[in-house]
Amino acid sequence: MRAQPLAIHGTGLMTAVGSDAVSCGAAFRVKVTNPTPTRFIDSAGDWIMAHQVGVAGQRPGLAKLACMAATVIDEALAGVVSSDRPGIPLLLCVAERQRPGRLEGLDDRLFEEIRMLLSERFSQHSAVVAQGRVGVAVALARARQQLQAGVADRILIAAVDSLLCWQTLMHYDRADRLLRQDNSNGFIPGEGAGAVLVGKPTGRTELLCTGLGFAHEAAHIDSERPLRADGLAAAFRAALREAGREIYDFDYRVADLSGEQYYFKEAALALSRTMMQPKDEFDLWHPAECTGEAGALAGTAIISLIDTACRKSFTRGPRIVAHMANDAGARAAVLMEQQGAR
C-alpha cells in the first residue's frame, strides 16, 4: 500500500562551506571542502582538523548550536507569514543519547534557547528526536503521522549537531576513526544545522518524500559481527514497498557516508541485495565530504542537496534514494521524487 507523500516546502542549511541552503548546494555541487585546525591534538601529536562553522560571538557549546539552529529555521520559514508560525510543530533532531561527549541540555534547554532566539511559540506537538544521523528520517515519519492526524498543515524539522568537543573527539581518535595522515579509514569531524519544512503535496512541481523505511543492523560498526547489510537492505525494501517502486526505478543515491570504509561497504552490500535488475549507472553523492561528519545534520544536508539539485537542474533524474545510518545500528531509507519533473 502506498503511503501518503510529504512535500518539501522549504529548506535551510548552515555548514562549514555555506551559510544558507543555496550556497551549501553550490559548494556540494563542486565538492568544496573547508577543514581548519581545531584547538585539539590527536594521539599522533597533530592538530585535529575539522569542518567548523563560524558564528559571530559564539564559542562551541549549547549557545552556538541554538544560534545555528535558529538561523536555518528562519531560512526554512521564509515563505511562511509570521501569523502562521506559532501553529507549526518543531521536530528538533539532535545527537543520540549514547554519543560520547554529548552536551548536556540537548533534550530540554536547547529547544527553549532556540525558541527565545526566534521569539516563536511552536506548537505543543513539538518534540526532540535524539537519533543522530537517522533522526531526520524518524522526524519525517512523525511529521507524516501528524499531517495525517490533522495536527497541523506544515511541520518543521530541524537538526543541529557538532562533534567538536574534546570528549567526543578523544573517543573517535582512540577508536582510530578520525582521518589522519596515518589513518585513511576515518572521517573529518564537523558541525552545522539544517531545517526542512514539510507539508501535504500541492500538485505543483515540488520535491516529494514518497517512501520511508527503517531497520536495525546487528553488525553495527562497534560490533565484531560480519557485515551483511541486513539492516540497510531491509530499510530499502520497506521504503520501496511504501513508494510502490523497485530500486532500479531510481536515478541516483545520496547518503550520509563520511569516509569510513565500513559504511561504504554497507551501502554497496545493501544495494547488491536489493538490485535485482542491472543499471548502467547509479551514482552516489555524499555531502559529508564537504560538511564533515556532523551527526544529526546529515539528513537535512541530504534533503537540502536533493532539493537544490532539482531546483537548479543539476539532478541526475527525478527519483532519488537517500539513506542514513547511525553507529548504534539504526538504519533508514528515504525515497524522494520530483513531482512534475520532465
Image: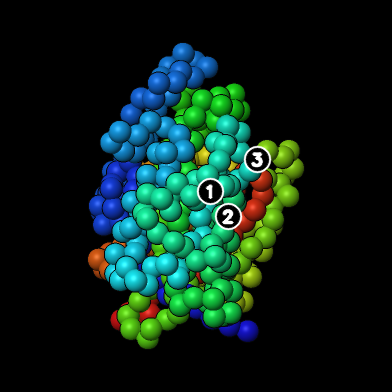
Report the residue at 60% width, 51% height from top.
Answer: 131
**With 100 as the anchor, is 304 left or right in this view?**
left
Residue 35 seen anywhere in this rendered image of the structure? no
Q: Quadrant of the N terminus?
A: bottom right
Amino acid carrying mark 1 in the image: Val
Amino acid carrying mark 2 in the image: Val
| Image coordinates for residue 86, horizontal then vertical, percent | 42, 67
- Could you say which quadrant of the image residue 98 lies in? top right
| Image coordinates for residue 244, horizontal then vertical, percent | 57, 81
Badge 3, how many Cα within 10 Å: few under 14, some, many 20+? few
Q: Secondary structure at mark 2?
A: strand
| Image coordinates for residue 229, horizontal then vertical, percent | 65, 54
Circle 3 residue: 98
Report the residue at 56% width, 47% height from top.
Answer: 108
Kindly identify which numbered label has been placed on residue 94.
Answer: 1
Q: Secondary structure at mark 1?
A: strand
